[in-house]
Image: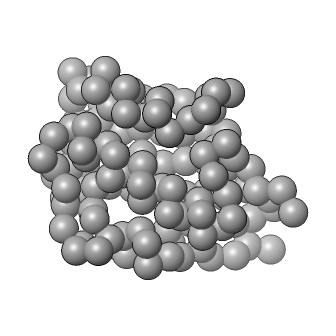
């Protein structure tokens, strides 16, 4: 059985998808970009600020499902430019306490709303 997870503390979907879906003890979180949920505006002052906003959006969705970053087993990072990898990685690392999830990072030609970074995650959600 699947359960749709939505919270007002993360950006509203900008298309026909859910913020996250819980199914068989796994939480699948849609790619998050740097939209501030309070203003629905994109936060792109710097790649560090942009990445923090993305991670805060993911945190809000995890919290809505009664989880935290320790539950994350897999992430995918999409970057507009691999030259931003080090800065994104530095911010990303601060959200985990060890036992890092599996991950891939890929450079793409364009992201929604012309942002620089998008991150999706999969987390384990025990009963």
The answer to whether residue 17 is seen in the rendering is no
Q: Where is residue 77 in the image (x, y as percent from the top left)?
A: 41, 37
Quadrant where the N terminus is found in the figure: bottom right
Q: Where is residue 84 in the image (x, y as percent from the top left)?
A: 24, 26
| Residue occupying the point 43% across, 72% down | 9
Q: Where is residue 16 in the image (x, y as percent from the top left)?
A: 42, 76
Toward which corner of the image does residue 23 lie, by quadrant? bottom right
Is residue 44 positioned above or below 48 on the image?
Answer: below
The answer to whether residue 2 is seen in the rendering is yes
Q: Which residue lies furthest to the right in this view?
A: 127
| Residue occupying the point 50% across, 63% down | 60
Q: Looking at the image, which is closer to me, 117 or 57?
A: 57
Is residue 41 positioned above or below 73 on the image?
Answer: below
Q: Looking at the image, which is closer to me, 12 or 17?
A: 12
| Residue occupying the point 76% across, 56% down | 125
Q: Position of residue 109 (x, y in %)?
A: 21, 38
Toward which corner of the image does residue 127 lie, by quadrant? bottom right
Is residue 48 positioned above or below 89 on the image?
Answer: below
Q: Looking at the image, which is closer to me, 74 or 35?
A: 35
Q: How is the model colour-coded?
A: one colour
| Residue occupying the point 53% across, 64% down | 61
Is 52 left, or right, of 97 in this rendering?
A: left
Q: How many marks on residues?
A: 0
């Amino acid at each position: 059985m699947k359960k749709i997870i939505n919270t007002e503390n993360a950006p509203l979907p900008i298309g026909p998808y859910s913020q996250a879906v819980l199914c068989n003890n796994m939480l699948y979180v849609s790619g998050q970009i740097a939209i501030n949920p309070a203003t629905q505006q994109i936060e792109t002052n710097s790649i560090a600020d942009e990445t923090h906003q993305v991670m805060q959006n993911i945190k809000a969705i995890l919290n809505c499902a009664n989880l935290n970053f320790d539950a994350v087993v897999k992430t995918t990072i999409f970057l507009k430019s691999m030259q931003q990898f080090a800065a994104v990685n530095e911010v990303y690392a601060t959200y985990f306490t060890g036992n890092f999830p599996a991950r891939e990072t890929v450079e793409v030609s364009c992201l929604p709303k012309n942002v620089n970074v998008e991150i999706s995650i999969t987390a384990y959600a025990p009963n």
